[in-house]
Image (cartoon, rainbow, N blue to C red):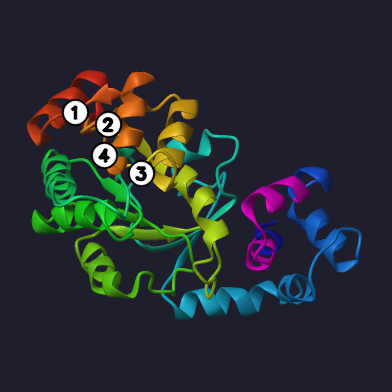
Amino acid sequence: MSDDRLRLAFAGLHPDRAWELRERFDGATGALRAIQRGRVKASDHVREAAGVDAATRREQVASLGVSLLFRGESDYPTHLDRYEDAPDLLFVRGRLPQQPGVAIVGTRRCTSYGLELARAYGQAAAEAGWPVISGLARGIDGEAHRGVVDVGGVGVVVLGCGIDVAYPREHERLGQQILDAAGAIVTEYPPGSPPDGWRFPPRNRIIAGLAAAVVVVEAARTGGALITAVRAAEYGIAVFAMPGDVDRASSEGCNLLIRDGAFPVLAPDDLVEELRLVHDLAGG
């Protein structure tokens, strides 16, 4: 039942752990029972959080102006629902588009050239009518979001923290601008969840799963942007990457993606044309 799914989400478990417990104990109700009866290892904090009744949690969510999207229900994005590891529950502010969009991601340690192109890619994709998805992080992500805001497009922010947590703090206004332009902020983590490092790798599968294409502007050999691209490739989603200098760390990840089969993209117009050739995104 949805009440127990909500309570389990508020337990604050790692998404992989929550999925494993639902599978092992036949759903959220069984997982909660196992936690409360000590049948699985869990901290006192997790047991306490899981014990709060669903009515209290719903009041908490409503006070924040947040919607709950349960997997399998009609308002849950169908393009995300097709992946086995999709979140069981999404916390959403704003309006999450029902059609897949274009994810634009990259490193925080980017060049000024990368920032310029990320903004231009965000503008171009938004002007072409596609929702633009990213993580609101410093660097490439934030600049892609700014490009969407520049042209009044629809943006989707996927957080690695609670929906009521501003992270990074300096992007709080940017997130509000996205909401004001009929976009959305979404997370699988319950309100109050801090931006702990372990939350971000699972977050990246949501960015990929909400998209019909992933564009990596600049990325090192490791990091969140590469995780997003790899997950997208596993999902069968088209991956695009901007080539860069072979001796520049912020281009190494993109160059490796292209070597391994990602589509190279050179300019905003090139991106839009490539997207149209690979996917009929405009039709949702």
For the residue marked with disc 1, what is the amino acid?
Answer: Val
Above or below for 201 versus 32: above
- Label 3 neighbourhood size at 10 Å, few (<14), some (14-19), many (20+)? some
Question: Disc 2 vs disc 1: Cβ atoms closer than 8 Å?
Answer: yes
Residue tagged by mark 4?
248
Earlier-in-chain disc, 4 versus 1: 4
For the residue marked with disc 2, what is the amino acid?
Answer: Ala
Look at 64% across and 76% down and name the residue there: 55
Look at 54% across and 47% down and name the residue there: 73
Look at 19% across and 50% down and name the residue there: 111
Earlier-in-chain disc, 3 versus 2: 3
Whether residue 13 appears in magenta in the rendering, the answer is: yes
User: Which segment did they paint magenta?
Assistant: 6-21
Residue tagged by mark 3?
98
- Locate the N terminus and report the quarter of the image it occupies: bottom right
Earlier-in-chain disc, 4 versus 3: 3
Residue tagged by mark 1?
265
Earlier-in-chain disc, 4 versus 2: 2
Query: Is residue 33 left or right of 137 when viewed as pictured?
Result: right
Foreground residue among 119 and 208: 119
